[in-house]
Amino acid sequence: MKLTALQLLLWHSALWLVQEATPLRPTSSLPQSFLLKCLEQMRKVQADGTVLQERLTGCLHQLHSGLVLYQGLLQALAGITPELAPTLDMLQLDISDFAFNIWQQMEELGLAQAVPPSQGTTPTFTSAFQRRAGGVLVASSLQSFLELAYRALRCFAKP
């Protein structure tokens, strides 16, 4: 009962806010120059919003695709060494969670494709040396990717 009442209250509050933000009907008492300036500013804000959404969409798609790629690369490193197995498992889980969170955010914003991208072809490391060498390369590349992703996401966080 309390949950229903709370939902009803939130719904009513949201409607009230929308009504408050709805422009009033046009009046002829405002100067034409003012109205034209407002229209020009509105178009600029809409254009800026479109550009921001396009940049955000591209950034999130690239970030998600990169994380999916690294998921596959980290899976290919399975069995690298018994000492590194727990760290590798934790890193795989963190990258999977990060990719899922990005995908979920894209869905909430209406930016996600119908089907998430697949991992594609991943390398096969046939020897212990290849896994260790691949591990060094993947870890270095992943570090660079995450630093770049951090800088890109910080750009969107700045006011």
Image: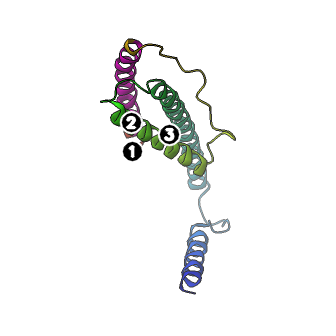
Circle nearer the N terminus (3, 2): 2
- For the record, the magenta segment spans 130-153
Rendering coords of residue 2 (x, y %): 53, 85
Mark 3 lies on a secondary structure that is helix
Residue lying at 34% horizontally and 21% vertically, measured from the top left: 140
Which residue carries the number 2 mark? 91
Which residue carries the number 3 mark? 99
- Quadrant for residue 11, please give it: bottom right
* Amino acid carrying mark 3 in the image: Ala
Rendering coords of residue 151 (x, y %): 36, 33
Mark 1 lies on a secondary structure that is helix
Give the vertical position of 140 relative to 58 (above or below): above
Which residue carries the number 1 mark? 157
Rendering coords of residue 156 (x, y %): 42, 41
* Amino acid carrying mark 1 in the image: Ala
Chief SS of the magenta region: helix
* Amino acid carrying mark 2 in the image: Leu
